Image (cartoon, rainbow, N blue to C red):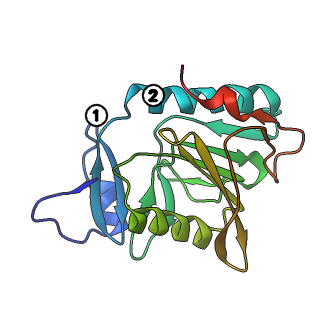
Amino acid sequence: MASLPNSKIVTYEEWLRMPVVEDEIEEVVNGEIRLMPPNKLKHAQAIENLHRPLHLQLDPERFTVLGSTFGLIIRKHPLTSRVPDLAVFENSTLVERDGYIHSAPSLVVEVMSPANRKRQREEKLADYASLGVPEVWLVWLNERKIEVFLLENGKMHCAQVVSDGVLRPGKLPGVEIAVPSIWPK
């Protein structure tokens, strides 16, 4: 993740007026625009391997599964917008304004890169906690493990680390994902 050179802190209103640049992924953290490279193949495959079973197991009348690049507004002041790798929203609570989502998903999945630093991971988890996301999965492809974080008392706590077995998201009744099916071939 790189910050823009000579960057300034942008407000939500300024950010909305900025031109959209195709093929660029950006997050905004405390008003600072951070550019991210496109996902590598194994990263994209892991997202698809999670998206497919979630999509098949969830009722589309009740849930929306997003596995594409989209902006999730954490807060407007200072502007923080994240781009989760995958998120599941309950349709009854999904709020869209200005083309962006302004509500907490039931589940967020982030496929972590070896380049992700501990501080970046902690920032993301704190942002998701502040939005009220009840469950976050951090997927580590190189180590073939998934850290499951649950929201407790306003903070994310690691509830379990899995490398095999079945994942059952707490807010998604009946959903089961075999951990080995997540790993790219």
* Residue under label 2: 42
All told, the count of numbered labels is: 2
Residue nearest the viewer, comparing 7 with 2: 2
Residue nearest the viewer, comparing 121 with 134: 121
Residue nearest the viewer, comparing 11 with 148: 148
The residue sitting at 75% across, 48% down in the picture is 90
SS label for mark 2: helix
Residue 182, quarter of the rendered image: top right
The residue sitting at 18% across, 70% down in the picture is 8
The correct choice, above or below, for 130 with respect to 81 in the image is below
Residue sticking out furthest to the right: 174
Residue sticking out furthest to the left: 6
The correct choice, above or below, for 74 with respect to 51 in the image is below
Residue nearest the viewer, comparing 114 with 99: 114
Q: CA distance from mark 1 to mark 2?
A: 22 Å
Say left or right for 107 vs 42. Answer: right
Q: Residue 27: image x %, image y %?
A: 36, 55
* Residue under label 1: 22
Residue 118, quarter of the rendered image: bottom left
The residue sitting at 33% across, 35% down in the picture is 38
The residue sitting at 46% across, 39% down in the picture is 69
